[in-house]
Amino acid sequence: MTIHVLSAARHMAKQSNWSLSNLKLQKLIYLAHMFHMGRFDGRALVDGHFEAWDYGPVHPTLYHQAKVFGAQPVRDIFGQADELHEGSEKELLDEAYAALGHAGAGQLVNATHRRNGAWDQYYIPGARRTIIPNPAIRAEYMSMGDDD
């Protein structure tokens, strides 16, 4: 089941005790989305799409919801988002946060800017609205090899 990106963001931000910036939240959701697609036969984790922006993959719905915080931690502005219940989606978000939640913003940017990765293939300097197709995101995961 694909979940709403704001539900995923609320869950991830709550895991961090509301300490994640918009940039870190974007990267963590993107990486969780990539892992989910790789592990679950191309099935998307979150609805909508990611775009190739200057600082990496960005989910525009999440960006516009959280941009008011700038570089500060994103607070609970996800009132309309459903709480996540048990399932592979919640488990994968928890796993992604446990593995990467304490990484620095620079480390997360580097992880999403992998050479020949999905972002790299679609990035046009200064451009926005360039969609990173889900098959390209899955292909990047598959090129890394499954670490399970």
Image (spheres, rainbow, N blue to C red):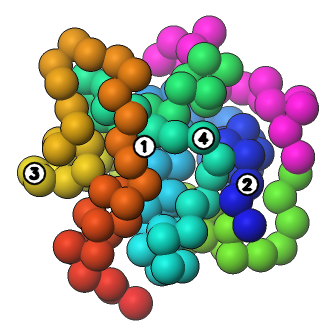
The answer to the question of whether label 4 and label 2 lie on touching residues, with beta carbons closer than 8 A, is no
Q: What residue type is labelled 3?
A: Arg
Q: Which of marks 1 and 2 is nearer the N terminus?
A: 2
CA distance separating discs 3 and 1: 16 Å
Most extreme residue toward the left is: 115
Q: Distance between the residues labelled 4 and 3?
A: 24 Å
Q: Does the segment drawn in magenta span residue 89?
A: no
- Disc 1 + disc 2, Cβ < 8 Å: no
Inspect the image, locate mark 1, and give the three-letter code of the amino acid beneath it: Lys
What amino acid is labelled 2 in the image? Answer: Ile
Asked which secondary structure carries label 2, the reply is: loop
Quadrant assignment, res 120: top left
Q: Considering the image in quadrants, where does the C terminus appear?
A: bottom left
Q: Mark 4 points at which residue?
A: 48
In this rendering, the answer to whether 99 lies above or below 23 is below
Give me the disc on residue 133: none
Q: Nearer the viewer, residue 75 or 48?
A: 48
Check disc 2 and report the residue beneath it: 3
Picture coordinates of residue 63, whole percent (x, y): 55, 23
